[in-house]
Image (spheres, rainbow, N blue to C red):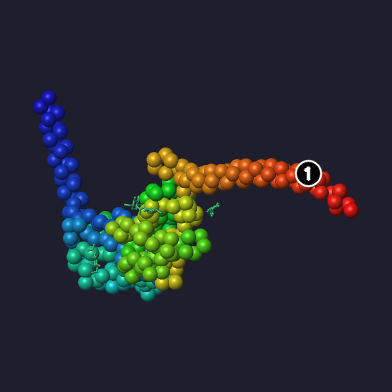
Amino acid sequence: MGLIIIYEALMYLLVLLFNCAVAQVSGSSDLICSTKALSVWPGDDVILPCRLQPPLSAESMRVEWSRPDLEPGFIHVHQDGRFLYELQNPHYNYRTSLFVDQLPNGNVSLKLSRVTQSDAGTYRCSLPSVQQEASVQLSVGSEVIGSDQPVQAVVGDDVILPCHMEPLVDVTTLAVEWTTRNGAVVHKYKSQKDDTDIQNDQFKGRTSLFHDEMHKGNISLKLTNVTLTDAGNYTCSVRKRLQKKKDNVELFVDSIDKKGRDVNSKTTALTAGLTVPAVVILIAGVVAGLIWWKRQRKYRQNVTKCRKQISPLWDK
Ligand SMILES: *[C@@H]1O[C@H](CO)[C@@H](O)[C@H](O)[C@H]1NC(C)=O
Ligand SMILES: *[C@@H]1O[C@H](CO)[C@@H](O)[C@H](O)[C@H]1NC(C)=O
Ligand SMILES: *[C@@H]1O[C@H](CO)[C@@H](O)[C@H](O)[C@H]1NC(C)=O
Ligand SMILES: *[C@@H]1O[C@H](CO)[C@@H](O)[C@H](O)[C@H]1NC(C)=O
């Protein structure tokens, strides 16, 4: 029993010592990179954030940024205070930099300039001297995603036409526009505010975007008091400089309103409203016609009678 306790205590001590040794080698700092995928538009610059936590100077370390899927794989290697240009994949020439003045703070973030579509991928940062390694995902050019499922609504409803950016990207500084199939402007947002000047009259005062959701790439449209004429296809689009991305959402509008009444019954009632007087007029007309016809017959009979009486005189 006592032996087991001594053995366990010894093992514990050994594990502790081993951990200390590893911590000493790695300087007990971890390399932390952005865990959320970064998304940028082609042509933009991006910072791939990575740092040693707690802060530990990386000034004298070899810092390797690489893309395991490329050959050669090195994007940027920094050692002995200089950038090793000769190791760099030529696709990245003149487009990468470290924040050299930030290395003493353990900030080993990489700046990548003038991003292109082919820059999308997984970037690995390695600090061999402290055996640390971490990755950052970069995607280029978010897509606008509308909805494959049509949105169903009933006349008088408020609806949300869903649309968002994937991967998520902040759209607050971009131009967002909702249009109908035939190009009518439903809602326009530009220079960080709604632009109602060119909005189609059909939608005046009935549309809004979720401004506090736009930094998350949410460009869903709220449309209030839906009418039958609102039914159809809508396009949500995002524009940055000359690039435009868009997708569609279809809106179905039912005429059964919230109280279960059929809005079409209004037209039925309207037709009924017209029919009743029409029938009355028709009947009245028929009756009048009959009376007239009867009178006419009586008159003709009288005329014939008269003629018969005076005809002998005429014949003369
Ligand atoms: C690293 O430094 C750059 C440039 O000063 C800064 O933009 C970035 O936020 C820093 N990153 C971290 C993780 O501190
Ligand atoms: C966008 O915001 C609206 C309103 O908060 C919400 O209903 C909708 O689910 C959001 N869409 C996404 C994709 O987050
Ligand atoms: C909804 O629209 C109808 C006409 O389309 C209008 O009569 C009604 O007042 C509107 N309701 C609201 C709450 O704006
Ligand atoms: C909307 O678009 C879909 C797919 O493009 C099409 O099938 C549908 O007929 C369109 N609806 C209207 C009302 O134009």
Q: Residue at left 16%, top 37%? A: 11
Helix, strand or loop for disc 1: helix
Work out whether residue 278 can be spotted: yes
Viewport quadrant of the N terminus: top left
Looking at numbered disc 1 in the image, what kind of residue is underneath it?
Lys
Residue 184 vs residue 213, the one in the foreground: 184
Q: Residue at left 41%, top 66%? A: 199
**Residue 37 drawn above or below residue 306:** below
Q: Residue at left 39%, top 65%? A: 188
Residue 301 vs residue 290, the one in the foreground: 301
Check the image and name the residue furthest to the left.
2
- In the image, residue 161 lies at what x, y percent? 41, 53
Residue behind mark 1: 305
**Does 243 sit left or right of 134 as displayed?**
right
- In the image, residue 156 lies at what x, y percent? 39, 49
Check the image and name the residue furthest to the top.
1
- In the image, residue 213 lies at what x, y percent? 31, 57
